[in-house]
Image: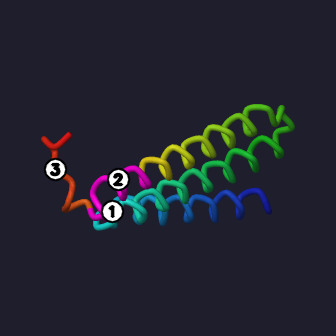
Amino acid sequence: MLWGVSVVSFMVVAICGLGAFISNHKHLLNVLLGLEFVMLSVFGIMSVNVTSVGLEVVFVMFFLVMAACEGALGLSLLVSVVRSHGNDYFSSFGVLVC
């Protein structure tokens, strides 16, 4: 019973994260936070499923490492964009500007 409740709650978190990722297109930081929110919920779903079945936790730890690397890459991209453009608005990014 507890397994189903936790998976459903993580699914609600994933849907809220996807909504934040899709709807907030004003700032790059909001988009990156929505993406991390989705990764956190996927990590929760994977950890609940792996512990309930009794499988190895190595894959879950590998996913957590990849999510942390993705977050660090996103933050470095954010810092680079703020240094080059002065802000993180999507409207200030030009497609043809290098």
Whether 75 is among the magenta residues is no
Residue shown at 55% from the left, 65% from the top: 12
Residue holding disc 2 = 81
Q: Quadrant of the N terminus?
A: bottom right
The spot of residue 31 in percent (x, y) is: 40, 59
> Residue 94 has which mark?
3
Marks 3 and 1, the one that precedes in the sequence: 1
* SS majority, magenta: helix
Amino acid on which the number 2 mark rests in the picture? Val
Classify residue 2 by image quadrant. bottom right
Q: Are marks 2 and 1 in contact (CB under 8 Å)?
A: yes
Amino acid on which the number 3 mark rests in the picture? Gly
Marks 3 and 2, the one that precedes in the sequence: 2
Residue holding disc 1 = 88
Give the distance between the C-alpha atoms of the residues marked 3 and 2, in whole angstroms.
12 Å
Q: Is residue 65 above or below residue 28?
A: above
> Residue 22 has which mark?
none
Counting other residues with Cα less than 10 Å from the Cα at mark 2, is it few (<14), some (14-19), or many (20 or more)? Answer: some
Give the distance between the C-alpha atoms of the residues marked 2 and 1, in whole angstroms.
7 Å
Marks 2 and 1, the one that precedes in the sequence: 2
